[in-house]
Image (cartoon, helix red, strand yellow):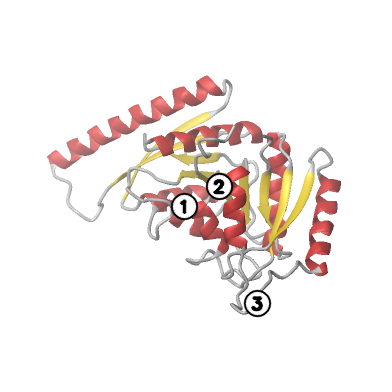
């Protein structure tokens, strides 16, 4: 199965930006591009809101014209990409989560016509990022320019989800022809005095961090010879703040959907959730593919 790059579109400026990112990803990956419009109210989740309505409403002509127009424009800018459209009788989030079961990548914008600002809990982007069945790329609004020649930054923690994130980040850096930054952030409390034994512990932690980064770098360099790899061993009271700061000069930040910090999916307060909400560049959430995916 030639899994497509899927992007959710609703005609909003955010979804137009997401569609452009998705077309670029489809071209890099030599995959078809599927534009999906879930045309029921976000709370409908595929069933009529009115319990006395015996049928599911048909898509509107306006939404079909919007999809056809976007597809035509993308085909013009990306002639090598096979662009398809699909309207789904479901809420936007539920429709994209379902499509992610058969997708190579799902791309969502960080704002939509629903009126959410950024990524509030419950927004379409946050739901898809948290529950997708394949990697999910969350792109920033057009008014937040991203340095396209910046590196791809990925957090390293030694976990299996973390290793998946590193592998995806390396592939993205290779596609983009840019460098890869491997960042390991150890927690630290700068407000407390640092006795000798704590300083020794910190030195040991830095040594462990360098070993972890060296192992990740070796795997990346074996898979992508010639890729420029930078290692950063950092200490911070809040790991997410270091990655958010690193995202200022990055083209992309990649994070796992679960790590040693104990967060499952994208729970509020997790490193992944913080990055999805506050990073200064697109964020790729490294969900594994379903076991039966090819």
Q: Nearer the viewer, residue 226 or 40?
A: 40
Above-or-below relation of 25 to 72: above
What distance separates the C-alpha of mark 1 from that of mark 2?
10 Å
Element type at mark 3: loop
User: Does the rendering let one see residue 271?
Assistant: yes
- The residue wearing badge 2 is 249
- The residue wearing badge 3 is 53
Element type at mark 2: helix
- Tell me residue 147's x, y (percent): 63, 47
- The residue wearing badge 1 is 244
What distance separates the C-alpha of mark 1 from that of mark 3?
46 Å
Residue for point 58% across, 22% down: 226
Q: Residues within 10 Å of mark 1 (few under 14, many from 20)?
A: many
Residue 242 shown left or right of residue 188 in the figure: right
The first of marks 1 and 3 along the sequence is 3
Residue for point 26% across, 35% down: 205
């Amino acid at each position: 199965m030639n899994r497509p790059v899927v992007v959710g579109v609703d005609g909003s400026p955010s979804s137009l930006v997401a569609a452009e990112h998705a077309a670029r990803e489809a071209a890099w990956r030599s995959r078809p591009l599927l534009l999906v419009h879930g045309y029921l109210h976000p709370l409908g989740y595929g069933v009529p809101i009115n319990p006395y309505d015996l049928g599911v409403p048909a898509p509107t002509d306006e939404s079909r014209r919007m999809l056809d127009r976007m597809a035509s424009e993308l085909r013009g800018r990306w002639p090598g990409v096979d662009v398809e459209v699909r309207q789904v009788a479901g809420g936007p989030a539920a429709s994209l989560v379902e499509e992610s079961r058969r997708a190579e990548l799902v791309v969502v914008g960080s704002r939509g016509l629903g009126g959410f600002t950024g990524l509030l809990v419950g927004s379409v982007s946050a739901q898809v990022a948290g529950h997708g069945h394949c990697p999910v790329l969350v792109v920033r609004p057009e008014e937040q320019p991203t340095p396209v020649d910046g590196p791809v930054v990925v957090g390293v923690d030694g976990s299996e989800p973390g290793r998946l994130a590193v592998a995806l980040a390396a592939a993205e850096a290779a596609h983009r022809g840019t460098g890869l930054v491997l960042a390991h952030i150890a927690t630290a409390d700068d407000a407390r005095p640092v006795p000798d034994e704590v300083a020794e512990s910190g030195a040991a932690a830095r040594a462990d961090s360098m070993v972890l980064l060296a192992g990740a770098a070796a795997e990346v360099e074996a898979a992508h010879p010639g890729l420029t790899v930078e290692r950063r061993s950092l200490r911070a009271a809040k790991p997410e703040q270091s990655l958010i700061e690193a995202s200022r000069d990055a083209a992309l930040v990649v994070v796992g959907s679960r790590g040693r910090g104990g967060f499952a999916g994208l729970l509020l307060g997790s490193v992944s959730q913080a990055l999805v909400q506050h990073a200064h560049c697109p964020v790729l959430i490294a969900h594994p593919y379903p076991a039966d995916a090819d």
